[in-house]
Image (cartoon, rainbow, N blue to C red):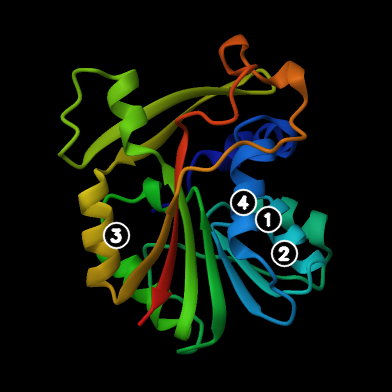
Amino acid sequence: MTTSDYDDFAEAYSADNDANLMNGHYERPAMLNLAGDVGGRRVLDAGCGSGPLSLELRNRGAEVTGFDSSTEMVRLARKRLGDDADLRVLDLAEPLPFPDGGFDDVVSSLSLHYLREWEGPLRELRRVLRPGGRLLVSVDHPAAHVLLEPDTDYFEVSPWPVEVEFQGKRAVLNVWHRPLHAMVRDFTGAGFRVADIDEPSFSPDTPRHLLPERLRERTRFLGFLFFVLVAE
């Protein structure tokens, strides 16, 4: 994964991410809920963006290291967490400069689906985890692609460019659709045991104005898919 266009719209993305429905009131609370008590744990935030999840984990007592492929995102993360934070510009598709077993947990929040190939990155994340450590993953829900693009072949790994708008700035996110069986195959092939698969509710304190009318009487929608993986 080369340095992405996030450098071009990092400020707008970060501001939107902090408060919107999909990130601020759905994905991030769900990841924190899966992480549970992280007090005293060494956590790697793989694809940290501008650092909102890293900050929450640190506030809950974790020792956090974060990295992202976007220089601008890392700059914003350092602004959020302070100059003493361990934040680096690194590529998830390349070998990582961390020791074997150096972390108790890795969180990969909406980052793996930017990669066509998962085998190498997952093996690297397994390497830097201690035995029994956890990899917490969120990705686009594979069923959502089929619902939005009915002509898609669900069973094939395929590019899925997503047009988005952040704070009035338009962008295209070049993500990859991956069927569930391919995800599980890659996880287990890299040395992980699937401990949980979750399709959580959005946060109960979500401001009502953020919810589309069709969700006003519901607590869940099809958006992201979450995994808890244990390093064997």
- Amino acid type indicated by mark 1: Leu
Q: Are the residues at dot 1 and dot 2 in contact (C-beta closer than 8 Å)?
A: yes
> Which residue has dot 3 on it?
118
Is residue 119 placed above or below 156 in the rendered structure?
below
Measuring 20% from the left and 42% from the top, which residue is drawn there? 157
> Which residue has dot 2 on it?
57
Mark in front: 1 vs 4: 1
**How many neighbours does mark 3 have within 10 angstroms: few (below 14), some (14-19), or many (20 or more)?**
some
**How many neighbours does mark 1 have within 10 angstroms: few (below 14), some (14-19), or many (20 or more)?**
many
Measuring 75% from the left and 20% from the top, which residue is drawn there? 208
Measuring 72% from the left and 51% from the top, which residue is drawn there? 52
**How many neighbours does mark 4 have within 10 angstroms: few (below 14), some (14-19), or many (20 or more)?**
many
> Which residue has dot 1 on it?
53
- Amino acid type indicated by mark 2: Leu
For the residue labelled by badge 1, is the local secondary structure a helix, a strand or a loop? helix
In screen coordinates, is 223 left or right of 126? right
Q: Residue 143, located in which quarter of the rendered image?
A: top left
